Image (cartoon, rainbow, N blue to C red):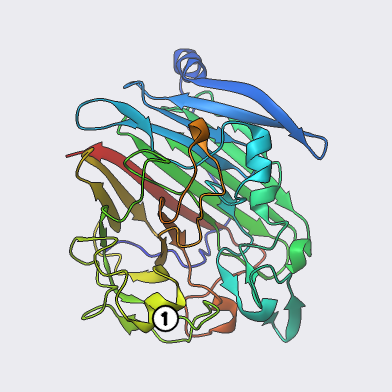
Amino acid sequence: MKQIRFLSLTLLGAAFIFGGCNQGAKNKSMIQKELIGTYKGKEVYQMTLKNKSGNVIRLTNFGARITWIEVPDKNGARENVAFGFDTFDGMIKGDPYFGAVVGRYANRIARGKFSLDGVGYSLALNNGPNSLHGGPGGWHSVVWESEIIKNAEFPTVKFSYKSPDMEEGYPGNMNIEVTYTWNDKNEIVIDYACTTDKKTVLNITNHAYFNLHGAGNGNILDHQLVIKASGFVPVDSTLIPTGEIRPVAGTPFDFTTPHTVGERIAENYDQLIYGKGYDHTFVLDNKEEVDASVYEPVSGRLMEVISDQPGVQFYCGNFLDGSKIGHGGKPYIYRSGLCLETGHFPDSPNHPDFPSTVLNPGETFKSQTIYRFSVK
């Protein structure tokens, strides 16, 4: 059985193995870095990573985000499958979460309030009555430090950020590292590491939107989805968990076998009504290597998701409306992208029965999520 990472109690420490000079030169040649703008006096860069097959991803230190994933279809034709924008100005004015690392607490916290050891904390309300994705000034909206790892086996970039005590209302000075590796198996390997000097809560994820037709090419209702989860987290009308873990069996949320995204999305089911479609955390079984997969039969593209986290938020673009213009001038229309955000459950600080999201001083949270691309 796969080890489930709640909030890891691993002591801080890591061992690094360095390759030779030739490997460093090779990786440097496979990563191109360019200045694309400035934000609040800090330089913003885009990094282009190419693996040995010539497939490309692009990253930026603004929000430590993925902006481009170019992979082939079954005929070898490459296309970008990730939402993003052509310019930094477009990124600033566009959807704040496309491809970004989200924290300090991804997803929602009810009424923007939680307590630790009897001390109450209040957060900005930026999603109706609730706090969403770490608040308006969360990690998606800051410039991170960036480092190209020259001696790694594959093209690798590390982003780091120091989140100050009480930033967006969260206690503790937190050090965050997010490392992206683009390997020769067309896997985006995302490694997270976080420490704090004060007891706090943490839920970190990547908020990439995917369309395996190609970003901006129609909707994702024909994508075939599998999620290895026998339960999911029901929510109320403001998308806050009720506290129940509901079995997926016999519901439109059963993706333990393949179903297209659109097959049951219009059913008269309370959770589909509350979410205006799918916008829910699935409780992963964590029994197999692959936790979720998406297949688009026309292109033959397959994306698999592998994680050590207890949940994955499946969102199918219910609030996209065509007003965001992405790569190549293409609008991101209603349900034209889906997200599979690995992490913990919404509002966990207020639900003691959920897996803990508390991180203490002297502990290191470590986690890994992989997005693997192939064809079949």
173 with respect to 286 (left or right): right
Q: Amino acid at mark 1?
A: Pro
Q: Secondary structure at mark 1?
A: loop
Front in this rendered view, residue 278 or 321: 321
Q: Is residue 35 visible?
A: yes
The residue positioned 72% from the left and 29% from the top of the image is 37
How many marks the image carries: the answer is 1
The residue positioned 48% from the left and 72% from the top of the image is 345
The residue positioned 52% from the left and 34% from the top of the image is 329
Within the image, what quadrant is residue 277 found in?
A: bottom left
Dividing the image into 4 quarters, which one contains the C terminus? top left
Is residue 102 positioned above or below 239 on the image? Answer: above
Is residue 321 positioned above or below 296 on the image? Answer: below
The location of residue 165, given as percent across then percent down, is 78, 62
The location of residue 369, given as percent across then percent down, is 41, 51
Is residue 289 positioned above or below 152 on the image? Answer: below
258 with respect to 326 (left or right): left
Front in this rendered view, residue 140 or 167: 140
Q: Is residue 183 visible?
A: no
Dividing the image into 4 quarters, which one contains the N terminus? bottom left
Within the image, what quadrant is residue 363 found in?
A: bottom right
The location of residue 361, given as percent across then percent down, is 67, 65
The residue positioned 52% from the left and 59% from the top of the image is 10
Front in this rendered view, residue 289 or 365: 289
Front in this rendered view, residue 28 or 322: 322
The location of residue 354, given as percent across then percent down, is 47, 80
11 with respect to 316 (left or right): right
13 with respect to 42 (left or right): left
Judge the density around disc 1: few (<14), some (14-19), many (≥20) Cα neighbours within 10 Å. Answer: many
Is residue 162 positioned above or below 146 on the image? Answer: below
The residue wearing badge 1 is 234
